[in-house]
Amino acid sequence: MQESSDLYDINERDSHSAWADHQHHSMEVDHVECLRRKIKYYFMNPCEKYHARGRKPWKLILQLIKIAIITIQLVSFGLSNQMVVTFKEENLMSFQHIFLKDYVDGSIDTYAIYRQEDAYDHIRYVIEQYGRLHNITVGNHEYEKTGSVYTPLSLCQEFYRNGTIYPGNDTFEIDAHVETDCIDIYPMNRSSSQDGLPHFELHFKRMLSFKISFVLKAINLQTVRHRELPDCYDFNILIIFNNEAHSGRIKVDLETDVQINECRDWKVTGASAKSIYLTLVFDCLIIMTCMISFTLCIRSVFNGTQLQFEYTLFCKNQSGKDIPWSDRLEFINGWYILIIASDLLTITGSILKIDIQTKVLTSYDVCSIFLGIGTMFVWIGVIRYMGYFRKYNILILTLRAAFPNVIRFICCAGIIYLSYCFCGWIVLGPYHEKFRSLNTVSECLFSLINGDDMFPTFKNMKQKSTLIWIFSRVYLYTFVSLFIYMILSLFITIITDTYDTIKQQQQNGTPTSELQRFLSECEDLPDSGVYRLDKNSCFLEGCLNKCRESHERLTSDA
């Protein structure tokens, strides 16, 4: 009787152990399937997520709204900024015609002086025009005041301290120290304007430059028609007589440094400020929209990172080895990073735009950079949603797959390109205007790669030296042949090979990574209903399974 009881206990213990092992294995399978569904759900597009859990695509709707309102904001700011740029350019042209003697439009690059008498005449002409500004200008230009005193016009001559130069004897003696001699002429002082210049001697043989500087003020009234408050402008005008080459040709140039300030006292009648307030409200709406988008994208990035850690831990426990970085980076959605960057740039640009409209700041250039890059990133982010369509997705996958090879190829081709730049600059620079500086050389060679401006580049080479002329032909022909017929063809081959590889992978449908092979075992469709669970159900299920396992272990031990 005792033997049968013991045998019964052994059989009961064995059956209970087998049932526990079966239940433990079943729980592991359920946990793996739950992880697969979580990862697969994470990589679904908004439409699939809607069918899977009934989750409305709020991020997609928000991004479409954001694209529309940000584009409207950019166009509005662009039109306002265009008025600022036009006002600056037209004032520069006005100053050139007013203060440069016998100036013709478009001749600033060739505007120069060749005689001593002409130099004095041009300087005297600038002083006279400055003194008669109120009587000759058709704009609202005015002298700058510091308190009750007008800011003077400054005449400054830079020259070598001492020097005796005798080109006929091929001898010279020069002191390389540069001295500056300046005098000030006040606009309302007629005697200073007429008597100051004759006592100002120009040392032509030692002179490096002669500079005339003064400040004029103006108000941009054209913004009133667009329901915007006008800005007050300070034009720091600098006229330079450049004689550094001492070649007998003094180049003359007029430059303006513009400062935009808030007008101190203003009053506008006949126009409503309602549109200004509406614009401010619209900018605040854009800031709020971008903040919501920023928060949602940050949450998605955090969820992806958390899921990546969970998948990494699972693979390490199952196989004992780490997953490759390519699979880890799949969880970090680059489109979210791009949208986050665009939101930050747009928020910063919108704040600057509000400050500009309320005349707290006048940083048009900084604001345009933030708004321009932010809008560009927003529109590029649209490609993410186009990638959900099969025909568009292959283009995106090709660009992403070919990017590493393209970068390596560009690095190698860039070395050859730089070698041609340096060679062309040092050899052809004295004989061709397009090779005078490294910047112009790079622009010229890049134009040649794209098949632009080829004939003028060949034709404009000066034929003063037969050796240099022959070298230029060899240089240009080899560059064009190498980059157009070889390097560009290889570049296209890299893209086409990647395209064929991606297309073949899509046709075969075979997974190419460990992560894709892991997900391919989950055959649950988005509309199957298995995804309509609480997002924490898998976590709760895991906790319950652990509790059951520990309880059963204690029962078996007892």
Image (tube, helix red, strand yellow):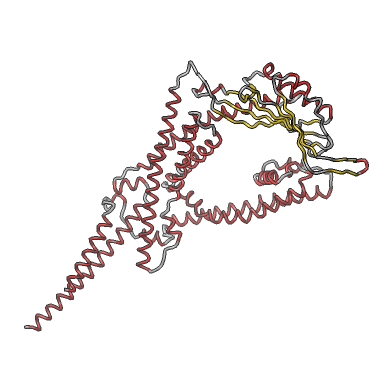
> Quick one: which residue is furthest to the front in this view?
148
Q: Judge left or right: residue 395 versus residue 194.
A: left
Front position in the image: 330 or 542: 542
Front position in the image: 26 or 321: 321
- Residue depicted at x 65% and y 54%: 486
| Residue 102 seen by the camera | no
Position above or below: 476 against 137: below
Q: Give how far across and how far down residue 212 sits, in percent.
A: 72, 30
Front position in the image: 287 or 542: 287
Position above or below: 471 against 452: below
- On the image, which quarter does residue 545 sit in? bottom left
Position above or below: 24 against 504: below
- Residue depicted at x 22% and y 67%: 550
Q: Give how far across and how far down residue 361 sits, in percent.
A: 52, 32
- Residue depicted at x 80% and y 44%: 176
Position above or below: 515 against 242: below
Q: Judge left or right: residue 52 versus residue 375.
A: left
Q: What is the count of numbered marks?
A: 0
The C terminus - image quarter: bottom left
